[in-house]
Image: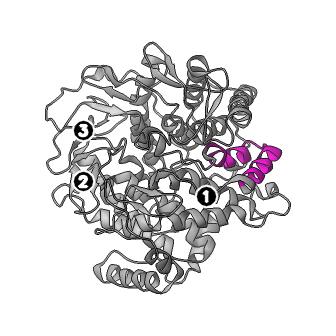
């Protein structure tokens, strides 16, 4: 099962070539549009004719999406000239004065995160990527990030519950409150980007808003189970979809509780993650108590009712595979190994994972695969934590499946149906930002990110944030929003401080200038699952993916100090 250094290098080179093919095709055929259609070899921009086409328009905003999302992948792969050229293209062509309505979550993790990460890694000459700084660079990426964040503020802060609206108008900064339903992940996964922006600007306002959103959501968890729902009404604060799970619409909320603790040293957020994890393990998880020993079924994390904890369906989705990576960062490697194995089993059935798989019927419920990165991410993190060569072979399986089934004329295409492998003409930006980045790092042992693996945190979009630099900047913030303890007096003090800053600072003045748009009804992107209850007798046949027993060399992070 061992893999030689030369074999790993060959695989890293193969991933490099895959990225180069897709990225170069985007520049040739897609730029300055947000995406490339890899079959027809044309660019894809915002769907202005169908503004309610949220499948496209939530992510696309006519703001160079694929280019910006790819910046730190170019850096990590050592493509110096391509990186500098990409920064130059962003500086020359990026404008947020676009008549588009975009999703706060997607704009934050893809565009804001991409701009911030690229800026951070080139503005510290002591960092591994400091040599990539283009001559004459004058913080343009940071200025663009600041501009974009300001345009989101009305949707984030000016709400009845302090929970953000899901969308905003890019050109005006007006919140779009025609839909008041927001996902848990969409509302609560802003901490890394807005916190890092505060650190870089020495302005605590942005971090304070993102942190306050998390606290407002935290207060909405079930008093019985400690669980959260899937979607919530921003105006009333009532849960609309009461399904609790670890997949679409919920996954990155828990990821960011933990990663924000790591990046900012915020003990309260670390404690919140621990409490959420306890509820998840108690109510969502079934299977043998000790994952790698004993009898019984492998662990499955179900979708349950947030109050009763009763199962509401029998499917898991491919986004849930990111949970293995969160468990690695938490140091629970045995559980991560078993959870990853279940998703690998599903991958092996089809050669690519369906978006949603029903464990009871052993068939897909949603058949498409849009080149998602979550399983590659967890595979990479498990390899870094265990150094077990099994995960290198899993990574090769992922690469081979993508090459075999998704490669198109000008890039790599979404799979419409994992059974017949029919394609859709779309290559989302996260394929370049995340999927290929994690696969490349899996095989490139000497990459600076791997050599200095304790120095970085990846965002949910796989953008790179240096821990020491951000923490040093955060320590100097006036009214540091990451320093409060978990008690009501501290929260009250924090809220008064935020309100004071909002009223007197430039942030407050900006928000007060923004008018309220007229209300219209629009559909929402977040999943709307009808709750049903039933029981499924677990079957050990699912445990076919692997039976590995790994003695971990290290837990990738220190224990909490609470």
Is residue 553 something that shows in the picture? yes
From this viewpoint, which residue is outermost toward the top? 420
- Would you name the residue on which mark 1 appears? 465
Horizontal and vertical percent for residue 304? 21, 42
Q: How many marks?
A: 3
Look at the image and give the residue range highlighted in magenta.
66-90
Which residue is located at x 56 percent, y 62 percent?
148
Left or right of residue 448, residue 33 in this image: left
- Would you name the residue on which mark 2 appears? 227
Whether residue 246 appears in magenta in the rendering, the answer is no
Kindly report which numbered mark, 3 or 1, lies closer to the viewer in this rendering.
3
- In the rendered image, which quarter contains the N terminus? top right
Residue 314 is drawn in which quadrant?
A: top left
SS at badge 1: strand
Horizontal and vertical percent for residue 436? 62, 35
Rounded to the nearest angstrom, the CA distance separating label 3 from label 1 is 35 Å
- Check the image and report above or below for 401 versus 154: above
Kindly report which numbered mark, 2 or 3, lies closer to the viewer in this rendering.
3
The overriding secondary structure of the stretch rendered in magenta is: helix
**Of residues 322 and 426, which is closer to you in this image?**
426
Rounded to the nearest angstrom, the CA distance separating label 2 from label 1 is 29 Å
Horizontal and vertical percent for residue 423? 51, 20
Q: Residues within 10 Å of mark 3 (few under 14, many from 20)?
A: few
Q: Indicate which disc residue 529 carries.
A: 3
Which residue is located at x 44 percent, y 58 percent?
168
Is residue 294 something that shows in the picture? no
């Amino acid at each position: 099962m061992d893999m030689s250094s030369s074999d790993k290098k060959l695989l890293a080179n193969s991933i490099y070539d895959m990225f180069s093919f897709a990225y170069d095709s985007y520049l040739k055929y897609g730029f300055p549009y947000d995406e490339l259609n890899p079959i027809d070899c044309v660019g894809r921009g915002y769907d202005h004719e169908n503004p309610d086409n949220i499948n496209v328009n939530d992510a696309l905003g006519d703001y160079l999406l694929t280019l910006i999302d790819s910046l730190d992948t170019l850096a990590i792969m050592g493509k110096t000239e391509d990186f500098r050229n990409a920064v130059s293209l962003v500086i020359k062509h990026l404008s947020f004065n676009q008549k588009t309505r975009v999703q706060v979550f997607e704009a934050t993790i893809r565009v804001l995160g991409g701009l911030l990460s690229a800026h951070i890694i080139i503005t510290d000459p002591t960092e591994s990527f400091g040599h990539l700084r283009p001559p004459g660079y004058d913080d343009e990426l940071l200025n663009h990030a600041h501009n974009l964040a300001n345009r989101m503020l009305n949707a984030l802060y000016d709400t009845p519950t302090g929970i953000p609206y899901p969308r905003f108008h890019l050109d005006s900064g007006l919140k779009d409150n025609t839909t008041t339903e927001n996902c848990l992940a969409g509302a609560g996964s802003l901490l890394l980007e807005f916190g890092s922006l505060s650190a870089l600007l020495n302005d605590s306002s942005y971090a304070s808003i993102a942190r306050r959103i998390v606290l407002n959501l935290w207060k909405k968890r079930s008093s019985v189970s400690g669980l959260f729902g899937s979607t919530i009404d921003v105006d009333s604060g009532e849960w609309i979809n009461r399904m609790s799970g670890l997949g679409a619409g919920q996954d990155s909320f828990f990821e960011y509780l933990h990663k924000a603790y790591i990046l900012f040293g915020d003990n309260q957020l670390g404690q919140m993650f621990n409490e959420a994890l306890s509820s998840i393990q108690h109510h969502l998880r079934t299977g043998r108590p000790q994952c790698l020993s004993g009898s019984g079924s492998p662990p499955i994390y179900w979708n349950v009712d947030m109050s009763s904890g009763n199962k509401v369906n029998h499917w898991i989705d491919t986004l849930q595979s990111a949970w293995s990576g969160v468990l690695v960062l938490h140091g629970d490697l045995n559980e991560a190994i078993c959870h990853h194995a279940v998703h690998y089993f599903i991958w092996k059935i089809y050669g690519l994972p369906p978006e949603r798989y029903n464990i009871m019927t052993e068939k897909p419920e949603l058949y498409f695969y849009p080149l998602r990165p979550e399983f590659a991410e967890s595979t990479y993190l498990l390899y870094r934590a265990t150094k077990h060569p099994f995960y290198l072979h899993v990574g090769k399986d992922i690469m081979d499946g993508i090459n075999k089934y998704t490669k198109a004329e000008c890039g790599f295409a979404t799979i419409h149906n994992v059974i017949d492998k029919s394609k859709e003409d779309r290559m989302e930006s996260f394929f370049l930002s995340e999927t290929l980045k994690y696969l490349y790092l899996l095989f490139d042992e000497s990459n600076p990110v791997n050599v200095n693996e304790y120095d970085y945190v990846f965002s949910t979009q796989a953008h790179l944030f240096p821990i020491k630099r951000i923490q040093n900047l955060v320590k100097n913030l006036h009214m540091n929003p990451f320093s409060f303890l978990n008690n009501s007096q501290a929260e009250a003090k924090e809220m008064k401080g935020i309100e004071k800053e909002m009223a007197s600072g430039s942030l407050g003045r900006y928000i007060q200038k923004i008018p309220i748009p007229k209300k219209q009804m629009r559909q929402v992107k977040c999943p709307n699952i009808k709750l049903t209850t039933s029981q499924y007798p677990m079957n050990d046949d699912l445990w076919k993916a692997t039976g590995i027993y790994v003695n971990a060399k290290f837990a990738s992070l220190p224990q909490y100090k609470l």
